[in-house]
Image (spheres, rainbow, N blue to C red):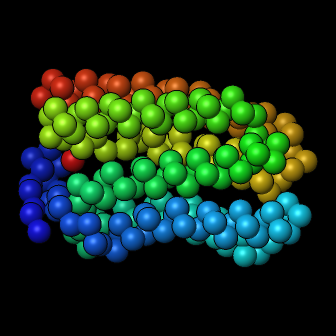
């Protein structure tokens, strides 16, 4: 296992794939299957098991980074797995809610387009500069606001005002975080080091 010292934040970054934190990140993707299956077979109703699984998915988004720092297993792979797991899990859940008619299709297209552009930018930075552009704070906030929107749709069907507010808040923070990613790419291209 290779370890490098990041001069910007003095955090050791490993190249390991098989870490507890990476497993936690991966697990977010796999909870989607039982959530969708149970919700659909229960007549679009939420039960305790679905609630627990969704709760775990939210908590795990913070838990993986905490575990990585505490166990000193922050890895280049993990820095990519974390946001990718977020996007895949959220994307699958939003696809489901679009299919059953609870979320507008245009929102899903905006969500996907933004993430594809971020993925292309991050891949370019990795290939050209050998750096991994970690999730920005605004990116994390974006995930949380979008999650709140999805939760309001999924758990509180009658809260139409909350749905509308969180829908447009999600759009705004998605666009803002996209700009923040562009600025991070620009800084890396100008010589900044972000691990």
Q: Is residue 185 above or below residue 9?
A: above
Q: Is residue 31 above or below residue 161?
A: below
Q: In the depicted view, which residue is nearer to us: 185 or 88? A: 88
Residue 51: tell me if it is visible.
no
User: Could you tell me which residue is drawn at 23 percent across and 60 percent down?
Assistant: 75
Count of marks, rendered view:
0
* Quarter-of-image position of residue 191: top left
Q: Is residue 114 left or right of residue 135?
A: right
* Quarter-of-image position of residue 134: top left
Q: Is residue 184 above or below residue 62?
A: above
Q: In the depicted view, which residue is nearer to us: 20 or 42? A: 42
Residue 147: tell me if it is visible.
yes
Q: Is residue 84 left or right of residue 106?
A: left
User: Could you tell me which residue is drawn at 45 percent across and 34 percent down?
Assistant: 116
User: Could you tell me which residue is drawn at 72 percent across and 33 percent down?
Assistant: 105
Q: Position of residue 48 (x, y in %)?
A: 76, 75
User: Could you tell me which residue is drawn at 41 percent across and 42 percent down?
Assistant: 137
* Quarter-of-image position of residue 117: top left
Q: In the depicted view, which residue is nearer to us: 188 or 88? A: 88
Q: Is residue 34 left or right of residue 119?
A: right
Quadrant (top left/top right/bottom left/bottom right) for the N terminus: bottom left
Q: Position of residue 165 (x, y in %)?
A: 75, 33
Q: Is residue 180 left or right of residue 53?
A: left
Q: Position of residue 143 (x, y in %)?
A: 54, 45
């Amino acid at each position: 296992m290779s370890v490098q010292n990041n001069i910007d934040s003095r955090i050791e970054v490993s190249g390991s794939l098989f870490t507890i934190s990476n497993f936690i990140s991966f697990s977010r993707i796999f909870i989607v299957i039982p959530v969708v299956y149970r919700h659909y077979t229960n007549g679009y109703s939420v039960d305790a098991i679905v609630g627990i699984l969704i709760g775990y998915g939210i908590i795990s988004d913070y838990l993986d980074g905490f575990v990585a720092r505490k166990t000193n297993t922050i890895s280049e792979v993990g820095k990519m797995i974390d946001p990718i797991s977020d996007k895949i899990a959220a994307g699958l859940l939003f696809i489901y809610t679009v299919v059953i008619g609870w979320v507008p299709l245009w929102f899903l297209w905006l969500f996907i387009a933004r993430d594809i552009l971020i993925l292309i930018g991050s891949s370019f930075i990795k290939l050209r500069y050998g750096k991994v552009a970690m999730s920005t704070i605004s990116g994390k906030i974006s995930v949380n606001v979008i999650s709140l929107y999805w939760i309001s749709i999924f758990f509180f069907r009658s809260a139409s005002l909350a749905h509308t507010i969180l829908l447009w808040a999600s759009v705004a923070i998605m666009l803002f975080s996209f700009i923040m990613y562009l600025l991070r790419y620009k800084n890396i291209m100008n010589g900044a080091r972000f691990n």
